[in-house]
Image (tube, rainbow, N blue to C red):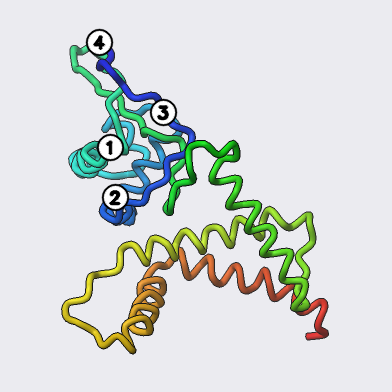
Amino acid sequence: MTPKKVRAIREVEVITDKKKIKLLSDRKRAEILNLLTKKEMTVKQLGVALGRNPGTVMHHLDRLKKAGFVVQVRTERTTTGIVQRYYRATAREYKFGVEEPARTATPPDRVEKVELEEVIRGLSAYGLTIPEDRMFDAVALLEGIIQKEKIAKATMPPARHRVPPGVKNSSEKVMHMFMLEMDPEYRRLRDAWYHFMMSFYARGNNF
């Protein structure tokens, strides 16, 4: 038995809604969605895979369903008569940012990677040349950092009172930096990027 009108899975879904971005900033929900981008799973299977109580999984799954990230695709009755519901994500990959116009022939993620490659190659003007055989690693690290920066900016708490125009931008930047530093995954990526860059910078600058 399969629910009617199940939306076809998309290859990439770009998220610009701040509330949806904030929803996925929760690690538990992000882990559930990541599993469901790979295959259909029941609440019990998700609980086993994540080592979490099915009730907790169901709570986060409901939030993801209401936001349109997850859909029920089918049901299956077990030999004991229990009906199992299978869920999957609505896309294979999610990205934060502004969606490219639908008429473009180049996928948004490919455009971003090409742009990042050009930026990284441009570092050679400052004495930092990344070998082409390490370009994939460089892009992956930088892309991860940029995604984390977008999430931190989108989930910043709103100002509780007016800030003088002359300091508003600076205050937002400092708060953005603080939000980033609270994220252990961002700190890991930042440190990995620093050591990656330093290994090539030192070679060409006699450090």
Which mark is in front, 2 or 4? 2
Question: How far separated are the C-alphas under marks 3 and 2?
Answer: 18 Å
Between 155 and 79, the one lying in front of the other is 155
Q: Position of residue 17 (x, y in %)?
A: 31, 51
Callout in the foreground (4, 1): 1
Q: Residue at x 23, y 44 (%)?
A: 60
Of mark 3 and mark 2, the one earlier in the sequence is 3
Quadrant containing the C terminus is bottom right
- The residue pinned by badge 3 equals 9
Residue receiving disc 1: 68
15 in relation to 102, above or below: below
Of 64 and 60, nearer the camera is 64
Tell me the crowding category of disc 2: few under 14, some 14 to 19, or many 20 or more residues within 10 angstroms, Cα based.
some
4 or 1: tag closer to the N-terminus: 1
Q: Which residue is mark 2?
A: 20
Q: Position of residue 100 (x, y in %)?
A: 49, 46
Position above or below: 199 against 25: below
Q: Secondary structure at mark 3?
A: loop
- In the image, taking residue 83 as reference, residue 188 lies left or right, namely right
Label 2 residue SS = helix
Identify the mark nearer the N-term, 1 or 3: 3
Q: Residue 143 lies in what quarter of the image?
A: bottom right
The residue that label 4 is drawn on is 79
Q: Quadrant of residue 86?
A: top left
Labelled pair 1, 2 in contact (Cβ < 8 Å)? yes
Q: Amino acid at mark 2?
A: Lys
- Total marks shown come to 4
The CA distance from mark 3 to mark 4 is 30 Å
**Three-letter residue code for mark 4:** Thr
Three-letter code for the amino acid on which mark 1 is drawn:
Gly
In primary-sequence order, the first of circles 3 and 4 is 3
